[in-house]
Amino acid sequence: MHDYTVSDIKVMEGLEAVRVRPGMYIGSTGLRGLHHLLWEIVDNSVDEAANGFADTISVTLERDGSVTVEDNGRGIPVGIHEKLGVSGVEVVFTQLHAGGKFVNDSYSYSGGLHGVGASVVNALSEWVKVEVATGGRLYAMSFRSYEDKDGIHSGIPEGPLAEIGRTRRQGTKVTFMPDIRVFETVEMNFGTIANRLRELAYLNRGVRFRLTDLRERGNAKELEYHFEGGICDFVKYLNSDKVPLYPEPIYISGKKDNIVVEIAMQHSDGYSENVFSYVNNIPTTEGGTHETGFRAALTKVMNDYCRRIGLLKDKDASLSGEDFREGLTAVISLKMQNIQFEGQTKTKLGNTEARPAVEWVMGDKLPPILEDLKNAELSAMIADKAVKAAKAREAARKAKSMAREKSKLENAPLVGKLSSCTGRDPKMNELFIVEGDSAGGSAKQGRDRRFQAILPLRGKVLNVEKKRLEQVLENEELRSLITALGTGIGEDFNIDNLKYDKVVILSDADQDGGHIRALLLTFFYRYTKGLITDGHVYIGQPPLYKVQKGDTAIYCQDDKELEKVTKGLKGYTLQRYKGLGEMNPEQLWETTMDPRNRTLVRVSIEDAATVEHLVTLLMGDKVAPRKEYIQEFADFNKHDSFAGKAKLDS
Ligand code: TSJ
């Protein structure tokens, strides 16, 4: 018999290792790590659904701060495990997977291994409750972590799995309370969870994902994601603010050497390439072998097709891959075993076998789609677009060498807009891109010229979303920005030549400011992505209010802060800044530029798909949905700010 109050040494050793080094198992103990707990559990349900045994997965953020995940699958096995002599449920929650599961980056988590993460979640929770409904019976078991004279004991069963009644349902329900002793925050983010569940819903066709937030009394939030079109719907969503060249995405799926390949793609009349890839539902932001295979195969199949229909003659050179990818939105999803990740953020697929598998499936399935008579228009559209792209590319190449020549000649006036700093160490230097001449003037006067450079922006920034490279190179504002950065753009981009460690966007807190910020971010995203991925781009946070009492001034960034500061305060004066231009140089320095006081929000690409959609939504043709997004875009990643709020005595 098992004695559940006396220590089960083996179990405790395993789970306590997780307690001692949580970061090794879930990446961090911040918000990311907290969400990681949820994904470890959800993964199990997604696997059950992927195997065809469940079609509904719900996540509930409970009022008491715990989180529930429920599916309608077969239920975690309740039978007694042969070797361990306890129920399958107990094994799943107490046995650390052999050797432990070490994550070496914050992005990766298990995908495809049943129960791997449940014991980690148990170890890092104050308590866990499990209910399994199967074979007409309902079973329950709970676990708890507690502290006594011997230290912390985590994930201890409160009793064996027990049958508690009869039921007509089937499935698994797990509720866990993240331990506040482990995490810096135990408040999960509704938006982050919603985004990921939406992504999972696209990647797992037909599975219903529900999210309920009961944390705020009287303000329950509920969402449901369910896409019968799977990744085709994903591509349509990504293209929803673009003009597609053909109505339905091309869908390709196949299996080669035990690798399941699924691809959806659709061209729009835009110019950028947007390929999003996944392996076992994990985003591969840095690409990898599967993306390489996709690109190679697309180029080959399309060139073959162009030759077959006579668009390319024997003597003609083949079109280049990027020509076939102009305006392309594609989602690539692989399911395979033993995935290996590489790259700076470990989000690049390294498995060499993935490339030929994708090439094989593409080579097998794409030609018949192109040849299909009812797809004649689609095929012609893609071929035609590529020919146009090739011509434009040639024109751009000429324009670019012209621009190089020109910039040699006109270097003086270009750099003339920039007030450079005196320091020569790029690692120390900062570039402030400031909206408007008057604010630019204040920034110039207020800055510390030893390490801060100012680039004032006069007119509107060009919307690069709608332009080809040659037009970008003709735009004065962007040319001076490109010159100032030193990195070059597009294919020529080289982060090693970056002249500043921080590139700070400083615009007004109003709609126009939001628009300018979005346009600049769009430019960075499209032409100097490395600046964002390497964390060099920041958004300055000028204050909205100044509260003055006697000779003390407190600056507030928003209404919430203002409310906090003025609560109970009497006899103060309040100034609301309408724009950066209203601040004098000293104020601008103190509140927004001085590294000792300022707040900077670092721009990162957490969820490339969301950012991409946001960028498209903001910059695309349809004006209507813009308004509501500008504020959200301005807010994105606010929790990433690394400095405290600006508070100072004047
Ligand atoms: F493990 C867990 F606690 F994290 C968890 C597992 C949490 C949740 C919400 C669901 C699940 C889960 C596990 N859902 N469905 C399953 N299925 C199985 O574990 C299972 C059932 C039957 C068989 C079989 O071979 O008969 C095999 C497995 C792996």
Image: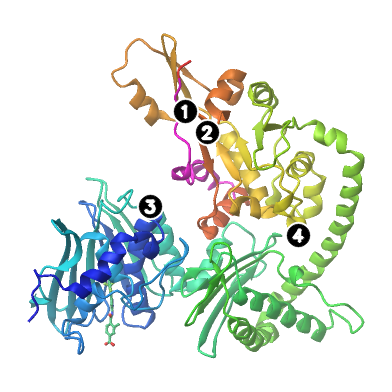
Question: Magenta stretch?
Answer: 622-648
Quadrant for ligand 1 reads bottom left
Q: Is mark 2 within 8 Å of ligand 1?
A: no
Q: Secondary structure at mark 1?
A: loop
Q: Nearer the viewer, mark 1 or mark 2?
A: 1
From the viewer's perspective, is 587 left or right of 647? Answer: right
Q: Measuring 36% from the left and 74% from the top, which residue is drawn there?
A: 46
Tell me the number on the disc at residue 646. Answer: 1
Indicate which disc residue 491 carries. 4
Residue lying at the far front in this picture: please name it. Answer: 150
For residue 377, which numbered disc appears in the image? Answer: none
Reply above or below: 344 against 100: above
Callout 1–callout 2 Cβ contact below 8 Å: yes
Residue holding disc 2: 541
Label 3 is placed on what type of residue?
Leu
Residue 304 location, quadrant:
bottom right
Q: Quadrant of residue 468?
A: bottom right
Sequence-first disc among 3 and 2: 3
Q: Which mark is residue 31?
A: 3
Residue 466, image x and y in percent? 71, 52
The amino acid type found where label 4 is placed reads: Glu
Of residues 570 and 629, the one drawn nearer to the viewer in this rendering: 570
SS for callout 3: helix
- The Cα atoms of the two marked residues, 1 and 2, are separated by 9 Å
Residue 123 in the image: x percent, y percent?
A: 26, 64
Kindly report the distance in space between the C-alpha atoms of the residues bearing marks 4 and 3. Answer: 35 Å
Q: Position of residue 470 (x, y in %)?
A: 81, 52
Residue at 82% x, 62% y is 393
State the separation of the CA atoms marked 3 and 1: 24 Å
